[in-house]
Image (cartoon, rainbow, N blue to C red):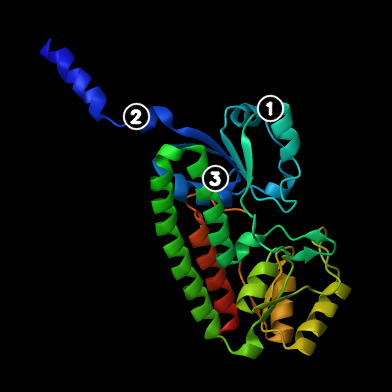
Amino acid sequence: MRFLVLLALLMIASPLHAAERINVVASFSILGDFVRNVGGDRINLTTLVGPDSDVHVYTPAPSDAKRVAEARLVIVNGLGLEGWLPRLVQSAGSKAQVITASTGIVPLKFGSAADPHAWQSVPNARIYVTDIANALAVAAPDDAEFFRAQAKAYLEKLETLDREVRDTVGKIPQERRKVISTHDAFGYFAAEYGIQFIAPLGVSTETEPSARDIAAIIGQIKAQKIPAVFLENISDDRLIRRIAAETGARVGGTLISDGLTGEKGPAPTYIDMVRHNIKALTSALDH
């Protein structure tokens, strides 16, 4: 009898959150990191496009439909990033609420389309986190205070990160704040922090550049006095060495744009990603 009474007391005293956790799906790794920081252990989180994977070209698996069908919330970036997602939600027969985490952000443009990479500005990341916290609080009102406290703590970290980036960029001479890059994902970063990303002349990200392309890039670097080059699609070290030798420009490392790395990589979290990118940029520019 004493055992039954003790068991009953334990059941009353123990939190019921483990049984009540809501299922949340995030479309890709950066959003997943935001959601994890807000939701903590009060949610069951599934991230569809995991680390080291490209959200732009993702093909959903049958297991994704099951996860979406079981979710209370599906959190997406929006701005045209996840073209594959509406069909997935429909095919899953999901009654989940789809939350666009970029709501409230004024998009930049890729021609006539929106630039979806809004997270590359840390102030925009703060908007994402606020939208996510509000959505979780509505979906699980019993945990609303927890979500808001988690969000507040994380927003403070992002505010510190934003100051860190501005202070670091501020130490780079104004005339050196420009790089050539085949990345098209850093428009928001450029607009927010004042580093100019210049597209290389004649280079397609689909093919290896020709000798004429390389000559055009070298001419462009010299003409515009560009101090650093991030050319991800040039895999031939000889070409990179030639560009560096003939221009004096430093060749940077990898900039991380569309997703996080695995735990052992340089950017397993959003904050790690921003720090990695600013370190790569400043080490190439601040000389």
The residue located at (52%, 49%) in the rendering is 134
- How far across and how far down the image is residue 118, in percent? 65, 61
Q: Which mark is residue 92?
A: 1
* Quarter residue 10 falls in: top left
Counting residues from the start of the chain, the first of labels 1 and 2 encountered is 2
Q: Is residue 22 above or below residue 263?
A: above
Q: Which residue is mark 3?
A: 135
80 sits to left or right of 77:
right
- Quarter of the image that includes the N terminus: top left
> Along the line of sight, which residue is nearer the eye, 249 or 115?
115
244 sits to left or right of 216:
left
Q: Nearer the viewer, mark 3 or mark 1?
A: 3
- How far across and how far down the image is residue 49, in percent? 62, 43
Rounded to the nearest angstrom, the CA distance separating label 1 from label 2 is 29 Å
Q: What amino acid is found at the position of numbered circle 2 in the picture?
A: Leu
Q: Which mark is residue 16?
A: 2
Rounded to the nearest angstrom, the CA distance separating label 3 from label 1 is 21 Å
208 sits to left or right of 25:
right
Tell me if mark 1 has few (under 14), some (14-19) or many (20+) residues whose alpha carbon lies within 10 angstroms of its own.
some
Q: Is residue 21 above or below residue 267?
A: above
